[in-house]
Image: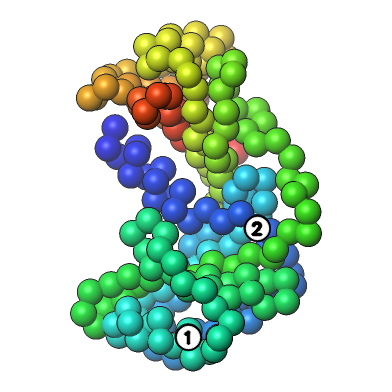
Amino acid sequence: MIKYVRCACAILMLAYTAAVNADCDFSDFPTMTEMQVSSLMDNAQYNNRPMAVRSFTVNTSADAVAGFYRRNWKDRYSESAFGPWQQIGTLEDECFFTVQYGGAGDNAFGRLLIAKVPKSDSAGALGVGVVKPGGAMVVSDLLTSDGPKAGRVTIITSDQSVSELVNFYRTEMAGDNWSLEQSFNQAAGAVLVFRKGINENNIVIMPAGDATQILINEVEIN
């Protein structure tokens, strides 16, 4: 269960609610000369909007990274915390650039995120095609593509109990020809692992206050 949760959470921390196109690219993103930058996520959609992400490492402190971007963006930046990261970002024309960073001593690392601010909220309904119980709400929906492999991580909230949702997914997935490969409980939650050929679908169901959270991690090989 821990493996599935960590994988999904790591992906979800990358999520950004804006759209990327050719007018917003990494050639406009300032980087430190000594930064080692690599592609992390180029062909993805979060809540129906495209995004692009790079990862970086650099042999300097996290404070030095923040100082570099403060100098570059002068008084046109904002700073905040996002999960385990500190982040600094700026809006230039219609492009929003964000640096999420952390580190220890003289070793900093993080992510560079680029997005185009949408002109209207025209993304449409979330979670289209995802199996979900009646009355449930899709909180977030992340789609990724890496060659022949397509991934999807969806978070849903429901007012049904863990046991009710386990029964729901067992029935619905079997009806769509998914085979239940693993099923186990941990703490107050449950994990269901389904397989259809070489495709896999992991469903983590956990109580969350007055509701129940469903995390669905789909991997499809085309």
User: Does residue 90 appear in this view?
Assistant: yes
Q: Which of disc 2 and disc 1 is earlier in sequence?
A: 2
Q: Looking at this view, is 84 or 132 the one in front?
A: 84
Q: Residue type at mark 1: give it.
A: Arg
Residue drawn 54% across and 67% down? Answer: 113
User: Based on the displayed image, in which of its 4 quarters is residue 203 positioned?
Assistant: top left
Q: Is residue 184 left or right of residue 202?
A: left
Q: CA distance from mark 1 to mark 2?
A: 23 Å
Query: Where in the figure is residue 180, as x and y percent of width and height?
Result: 40, 16
Query: Where in the figure is residue 212, as x and y percent of width and height?
Result: 42, 24
Query: Where in the figure is residue 178, as x and y percent of width and height?
Result: 50, 17
Q: Residue type at mark 2: give it.
A: Ala
Q: Is residue 172 left or right of residue 122?
A: left
Q: To which residue does mark 2 refer? A: 18
| Number of other residues with Cα within 10 Å of mark 1, as a class: few under 14, some 14 to 19, many 20 or more | some
User: Based on the displayed image, in which of its 4 quarters is residue 138 positioned?
Assistant: top right
Residue drawn 78% across and 59% down? Answer: 119
Query: Where in the figure is residue 29, as x and y percent of width and height?
Result: 58, 80
| Number of other residues with Cα within 10 Å of mark 2, as a class: few under 14, some 14 to 19, many 20 or more | many
Above or below, 60 relative to 117: below
Q: Is residue 130 left or right of residue 12?
A: right
Above or below, 124 relative to 106: above
User: Based on the displayed image, in which of its 4 quarters is residue 61 positioned?
Assistant: bottom left
Quadrant, the C terminus: top right
Which numbered marker is on residue 70?
1
Residue drawn 37% across and 56% down? Answer: 83
Q: Looking at this view, is 66 or 104 the one in front?
A: 66
